[in-house]
Amino acid sequence: LYGINDKGELIPLKKLEEKQSELIQAKANVELFVNYFYNIDAYNMKQRRERVRWLLGEQPTKIIVDKEKRGYFDEFLAINGLRQNAYILQNTLKINNEAPYNADFIVRIERINGKQIRYYNAQVNITMAQVNKNYPYNPYGLLITDLKEAITEIREVNQQDLDAQIQESDNAINQNAV
């Protein structure tokens, strides 16, 4: 069986299925990275920093080391109960179809300290290169070789707007065909 690609060429369906599978794995690698890098608290911080390093090349590792030196992670130990929840706004996730994969997306970060919640958006751009799979450390075989992030605080918090953005993101998950 054959399919037709966007250039009008005949391609065996097996190759199309392999490409779709690779793209799904790239998206899963992005989710894993966000989980390890942004979803942290005092109890899981050390383990997640170690695990995220298995997904990172030299340049992104330097970013984490720089954050460590500036005391970013020390806040989670110093402030009792401080935790971060993060998720990708799926409607912003853009990944190219060929390796090395470039992904652009926004991560919504909720920094929770007791009843006080501060919201941030992290505009993230990563490049992922294929490497050997190493389960459980790098289960998708994709190494993040380039990382850029720009974090901005959402100062004027309108809960209805935040809820609408989450709803739009959830709808994008259901419509995000590969």
Image (tube, rainbow, N blue to C red):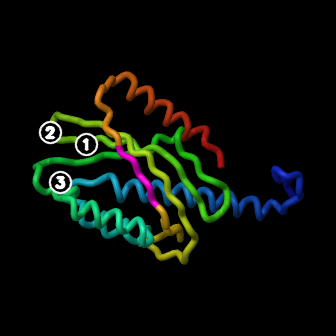
Please state which of the two labelled residues, at mark 3 or mark 2, is closer to the viewer: 3
The alpha-carbon separation of the residues under discs 3 and 2 comes to 13 Å
- Which residue type does callout 2 highlight? Gly
Q: Secondary structure at mark 3?
A: helix
Q: Main secondary structure of the magenta part?
A: strand
- Which residue type does callout 1 highlight? Arg
Please report whichever mark, 3 or 2, sits nearer to the chain's N-terminal start: 3
For residue 112, side relative to residue 34 (left or right): left
Please report whichever mark, 3 or 1, sits nearer to the chain's N-terminal start: 3
**Label 1, residues with CA under 10 Å away: few <14, some 14-19, many ≥20:** many
The alpha-carbon separation of the residues under discs 3 and 1 comes to 10 Å
Q: Secondary structure at mark 1?
A: strand
**Label 3, residues with CA under 10 Å away: few <14, some 14-19, many ≥20:** some
Locate the N terminus by quadrant: bottom right
**Residue 150 inside the magenta-drawn segment:** yes
Nearest the viewer among 78 and 22 is: 78
For residue 89, side relative to residue 101 (left or right): left
**Residue 155 inside the magenta-drawn segment:** no
- Which residue type does callout 3 highlight? Phe
x then y, percent, for residue 94 = 58, 47
Task: Examine the rendering and report whether any part of residue 87 can be seen.
Answer: no
Q: For mark 3, what is the residue? A: 76
Task: Examine the rendering and report whether any part of residue 97 can be seen.
Answer: yes
Q: For mark 1, what is the residue? A: 111
Q: Which residues are magenta?
A: 147-151
Q: Residue at x 10, y 54 (%)?
A: 78
Q: For mark 2, what is the residue? A: 114
- The vertical placement of 143 against 159, above or below, is below
